[in-house]
Amino acid sequence: MTPPCSKNPELWFTQGNDKAALDAKAEAARICRLCPMLDACRRLADDIDPQYGIWAGVNFNRQNPKIDRLTDEVLSHGTPAGAMRHRRRGENPCRSCLDAEQGRKWECEVAS
């Protein structure tokens, strides 16, 4: 199986924080969350600790941590990738992220 990111890798490595770039990052994260290779990608991201790009639905761009952190919260909260992101930050995953990680449906909370 070929992951969607291999067909248009530029989308997963969009630069900038203007509206167009944030929209592109959101689209890449949305596609990731539907990818059947999500778990393998999450394990790879854990192993390599990427500094740039969208990996397993999580925005790892370190160019502007404040904007990217907010983008990550909105894009991946309530998803398996959200649980991974909580752990990377040293936080316990919230209930909706844990449930998503375990394959349970849950109403997505909005990050504040």
Image (cartoon, grey):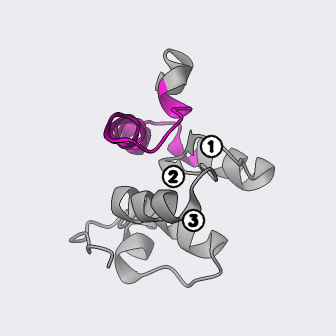
Extreme residue in the right direction: 48
Q: Mark 1 or mark 2, which has the lower sequence index?
A: 1
Residue 64's tag is none
Does the CB distance between marks 1 and 2 fall below 8 Å?
A: no
Where residue 36 appears, as percent x and y from the top left, is: 46, 36
In the rendered image of this protein, does residue 19 appear above or below residue 49?
above
Q: Amino acid at mark 1?
A: Ala
Disc 3 target residue:
84
Q: Position of residue 28 (x, y in %)?
A: 42, 36
The amino acid type found where label 3 is placed reads Met
Q: Residue at x 54, y 35 (%)?
A: 15
Question: Which badge, 2 or 3, is on the more N-terminal residue?
Answer: 2
Main SS, magenta region, reads helix
**Residue 40, magenta (yes or no):** no
In the image, 27: left or right of 7? left
Query: Residue 31: within the magenta?
Result: yes
Q: Quadrant of residue 1?
A: top right
Quarter of the image for the C terminus: give it: bottom left
Secondary structure under tag 1 reads: helix
Q: Are marks 2 and 3 in contact (CB under 8 Å)?
A: yes
Q: Amino acid at mark 2?
A: Val
Which residue is rendered at x = 51% and y = 32% of the image? 14
Visible in this render: residue 26? yes
> Can you give x and y, in whole percent of width and height, for residue 39 in the image?
56, 48
Question: Which residue is under mark 2?
Answer: 58
